[in-house]
Image: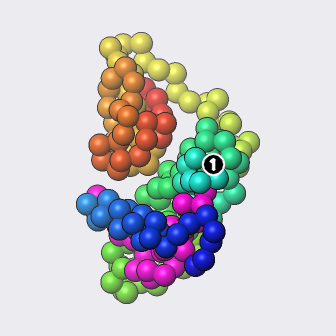
Amino acid sequence: MNHPEVDEAKVDDYYLKIKKQAESAGYHLNPDVEFTKSLIKSIIINENRYGYGACPCRLSSGMREDDVDIICPCDYRDPDLQNYDACYCGLYVSGEILTGEKKLKAIPERRPSPEQREKIMINKKPESKDLPFPVWRCRVCGYLCAREEPPETCPICKVDKDRFERFI
C-alpha cells in the first residue's frame, strides 16, 4: 500500500474515523481491512488531487460540482446496500456480508451518464410557492429540512452542505 502522497498513519486515522462514523449511523465497513484501507488510501489520494474524496472506483472529473454525487459516501451507497448488500466499490457492506452470511459480489454501476444527469436536473420539480421555506434533501441519507439554506453538515450522515439538493 505504498504511495508517496499518503502515509500509512493517515490511512489508519481515516479508517478509524470513518469506521466510527459508519457504526454510529448503522453502517458497516468491509471486514477485509487491507482491502478497505486500500480504498481509503485512494479516497485520500483523490482528496489530495481534487480537494474532495471522490469514489476510487469511478472516474472523477476533477470538478466538485460534477462529482458531488460520487463523493464518499456517494449518493448511490444506500440503494446499492439495499439491492446488492454492498456499495459499488465495496467499502460499505450489509450486516450479512459483515458476518459472512453473504459474499461480496460485483455491483452494477447505477450512476447516470453525464447526459442523463443533465436531463435529471432539467426535469426537477418546480418548487412550491405555498411553503415559507424551501425543503432540502440530503442526497446521501435522505434527511429533509425546511429552511432558507441546507445545514453546513448533515446531522445524520455528516456530509457537507453541497450534498443537499432542493427537494421542494
Q: Is residue 46 left or right of residue 165?
A: right
Q: Which residue is mark 1?
A: 50
Q: Is residue 18 visible?
A: yes
Asked whether residue 30 is drawn in magenta, I would say yes
Q: Check disc 1 and report its element: helix, strand or loop.
A: helix
Q: Residue at x 56, y 30 (%)?
A: 124
Number of numbered discs? 1
Q: Which residues are magenta?
A: 25-46
The image position of residue 92, as x and y in percent, is: 43, 68
Looking at this rendering, what residue extends furthest in the left direction? 24
Residue drawn at (59%, 54%) of the image: 48
- Magenta portion: prevailing SS class: helix
* Type of the residue with mark 1: Tyr
Q: Quadrant of the N terminus?
A: bottom right
Residue 85 in view of the camera: no
Q: Residues within 10 Å of mark 1 (few under 14, many from 20)?
A: some
